[in-house]
Image (tube, helix red, strand yellow):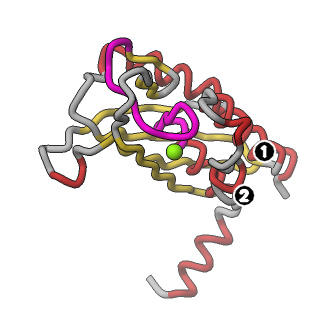
């Protein structure tokens, strides 16, 4: 495929945008911090350190959406130096990011999110996480978990990865 072919392909599909999001938070030393993933609070589990509730799923999804729409990233929108955001429910940040994406004329086609961690098991809460994230993102979000396989660099916290596909809103089609 030549550069011209690639340009033709981009011109033929101007209404699609893909975005990638990544986030990581380390395990917290504060035993009183709850673990929150995809808006689900895991009772009796060690939480993640962070200015907000450290929900890496919500953060990765928000970054994927913002990036796809060319609207920057979650750090620009919600600085972790803002005292008003201390301990904030990250689903509200995701909802605000999604609102800005919609205001820019985009529809969330779908988002796929992967969380990297060994414990706790996500399966019992997976559908609730998907429901929470989908409601906040305004489009279908799927979540899956992957183990670290004991790799040293991966065991110190939880990583969230997400890809989002946006479609230009119908009214903006030429
Ligand atoms: Mg984060």
Name which residue lies at 43% across and 40% down: 113
Q: Earlier in the sequence, mark 1 or mark 2?
A: 2
The secondary structure type at the circle numbered 2 is: loop
The answer to which of 70 and 155 lies nearer the viewer is: 155
Q: Position of residue 12 (x, y in %)?
A: 66, 67
- Residue tagged by mark 2? 71
Q: Is the residue 35 above or below the residue 155 in the image?
A: above
Residue 148 on the magenta span: no
Task: Read off the magenta span.
Answer: 43-59
**Classed neighbour count for the residue bearing mark 2: other residues with Cα under 10 Å, few (<14), some (14–19), many (≥20):** some
Q: Residue at x 46, y 49 (%)?
A: 23
Image quarter of the C terminus: bottom right
Q: Does the segment drawn in magenta span residue 50?
A: yes
Numbered label attached to residue 100: 1
Tell me if label 1 and label 2 are in contact, CB under 8 Å. Answer: yes
Q: Which quadrant does the N terminus fall into?
A: bottom left
Image position, residue 48 (x, y; %): 40, 34
In whole angstroms, how far apart are the C-alphas of marks 1 and 2? 8 Å
The percent position of residue 58, horizontal first and vertical second, equals 54, 36
């Amino acid at each position: 495929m030549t550069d011209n072919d690639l340009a033709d392909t981009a011109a033929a599909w101007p209404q699609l945008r893909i975005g990638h999001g990544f986030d990581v938070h380390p395990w917290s030393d504060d035993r009183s911090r709850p673990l929150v993933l995809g808006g689900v609070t895991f009772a009796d589990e060690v939480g993640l350190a962070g200015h907000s509730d450290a929900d890496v799923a919500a953060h990765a999804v928000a970054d994927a959406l913002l990036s796809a729409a060319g609207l920057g990233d979650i750090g620009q929108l919600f600085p972790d130096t803002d005292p008003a955001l201390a301990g904030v429910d990250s689903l509200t940040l995701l909802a605000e990011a999604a609102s800005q994406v919609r205001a820019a004329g985009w529809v969330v086609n779908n988002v796929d999110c992967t969380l990297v961690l060994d414990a706790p098991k996500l399966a019992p809460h997976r559908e609730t996480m998907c429901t929470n994230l989908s409601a906040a993102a305004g489009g279908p979000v799927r979540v899956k978990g992957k183990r670290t396989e004991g790799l040293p660099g991966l065991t110190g916290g939880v990583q969230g990865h997400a890809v989002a596909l946006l479609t230009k809103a119908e009214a903006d089609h030429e």
